[in-house]
Image: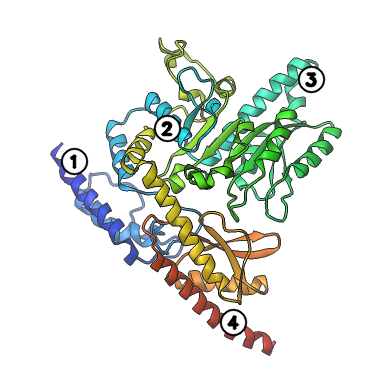
Amino acid sequence: MPEFRKRGKEMVDYVADYLEKIEKRQVFPDVEPGYLRPLIADSAPQDPESFEDVFKDIEKIIMPGVTHWHSPYFFAYFPAASSFPALLADMLCGGIGCVGFSWLETVMLDWLGKMVNLPEEFLAGKDGQGGGVIQGSASEATLIALLAARTKTIRQVQSEKPELTEAEIMGRLVAYASDQAHSSVERAALIGAVKIKSVPSDETFSVCGSALKKVLDEDKAAGLIPFFFCATLGTTSCCSFDKLLELGPICNKENIWMHIDAAYAGSAFICPEFRHLLNGVEFADSFNFNPHKWLLVNFDCSAMWVKKRSDLIGAFKLEPLYLQHHHQESGLVTDYRHWQIPLGRRFRSLKLWFVLRMYGVKGLQEHIRKHIRLSHQFEHSVLQDERFEICAEVVLGLVCFRLKGSNEVNEALLKSINDAKKIHLVPCHLREKFVLRFAICSRTVESTHIKFAWQHISQLATDLLKTWGQNHHQQ
């Protein structure tokens, strides 16, 4: 393997240089859609090309179209985690090339579950009925939970009312989520072929118990069968938190599967001062968050736990002869092919093992706390400028803000920010307001980057309001 040894070192050097100097790159590309096709051949080469030719085309062809998510000037969406322990683990994963390694994954999900102080029922332990699994994304975790809940409910209803066909039951099933929930919940219902309804959130953009109960009572009176509720902790729009302590008992009483989507916010629960945001998880049937967002584990690594693994296995277990093995009924092996949509899976637990050992809980806690400090620094700057307003409580690493005034002026401000390409932001709608989201994302972001971002936004706002006032006065 001398060629691999040589080229591998070159690639490691390139990646290290890229990450060390990423601050010097323009965060958002200048290219237009379709730029790539004229730069590459119409079809794959018949003869092999050299590594040197491929390598030089990285900067020439690929990098001009890349948005640099790990730049300290990237403040859009939510963090996309990255760290050198995770990168090295991914390299090892590719080198080993096996289909997952269940034992390490089981232990790593117990480690992670203990870090966020999950109830014992969610852990595999020695004889646990629950346990954790690494999915590819929070979208997959929500889909898995909804499909398992659907299967469980259909079987329960059929046992109580055998005269009903599966199709008749399916036609009456209803899932629920907040009007602030991620679109992936609606997509899960679409794939699962069930109805889904939005539960209205309150003035804090959170769903409370009374709002859910009202919708449930109406639907049950109409002959529908509520079976699934997705609670969100840390919504994408504004990082709001549904009220688990009110919602959980209602779901348990009504025999509704409660799934918790904490894709972004879940990482913060490793810090004791933020663990109260997870209070009420004891009522849930499943819980999910993404270490690949905020816990320095590169994509993909979405951690999902269930109280009863039998609910997943009962929904997805198939046993063709070519997949059977002599340990499958021993109770000693967790067969994760019954916990997920795909059959194959990467050895993703290696990334968790490397990161958790090489950072330690304290190192990861400091990373989370640093981001939250920086978000409050930005919030403070916004509050000092009377032209702006904060639109939602700043709890973790996201600040929702806007210019006081019309949606149109805020749309214009966002366009000027992103057109300048010095920083990158994305918007959201809160009720009828167009709002700018400022998320602390990069592992390497510092206070100086936050100061620069605010000064840049403030100056663009000044320039915009001068021309905006003149244009509207002329109109």
Q: Earlier in the sequence, mark 4 or mark 3?
A: 3
The amino acid at mark 3 is Leu
Instruction: Give how far apart the Cα atoms at labels 3 and 2 are.
Output: 44 Å
Q: Is residue 296 visible?
A: no
Q: Which circle, 2 or 4, is nearer the viewer?
A: 2
Q: Which residue is mark 3?
A: 164
51 or 377: which is nearer to us?
377
Q: Find residue 292 and report its horizontal and vertical position in percent.
A: 44, 44
Mark drawn on residue 30: none
Q: Which residue is mark 1?
A: 4
Instruction: Give how far apart the Cα atoms at labels 1 and 4 are.
Output: 57 Å
Q: Which circle, 2 or 1, is nearer the viewer?
A: 2
Q: Find residue 65 and report its horizontal and vertical position in percent.
A: 39, 60
Helix, strand or loop at label 3? It is loop
Tag 2–tag 4 contact (CB < 8 Å): no
Determine whether 177 is above or below 345 in the image.
below
Q: Earlier in the sequence, mark 3 or mark 1?
A: 1
Determine whether 22 is above or below 310 in the image.
below
Mark drawn on residue 111: 2
The amino acid at mark 1 is Phe
51 or 25: which is nearer to us?
25
Instruction: Give how far apart the Cα atoms at labels 4 and 3 are.
Output: 63 Å
Instruction: Give how far apart the Cα atoms at labels 2 and 4 are.
Output: 52 Å
What is the crowding at mark 1: few (fewer than 14 residues within 10 Å), some, or many (at least 20)?
few
Q: Earlier in the sequence, mark 2 or mark 1?
A: 1
Q: Find residue 289 and report its horizontal and vertical position in percent.
A: 51, 41
Horizontal placement of 273 versus 35: left or right? right
Tag 3–tag 2 contact (CB < 8 Å): no
Q: Which residue is mark 4?
A: 465
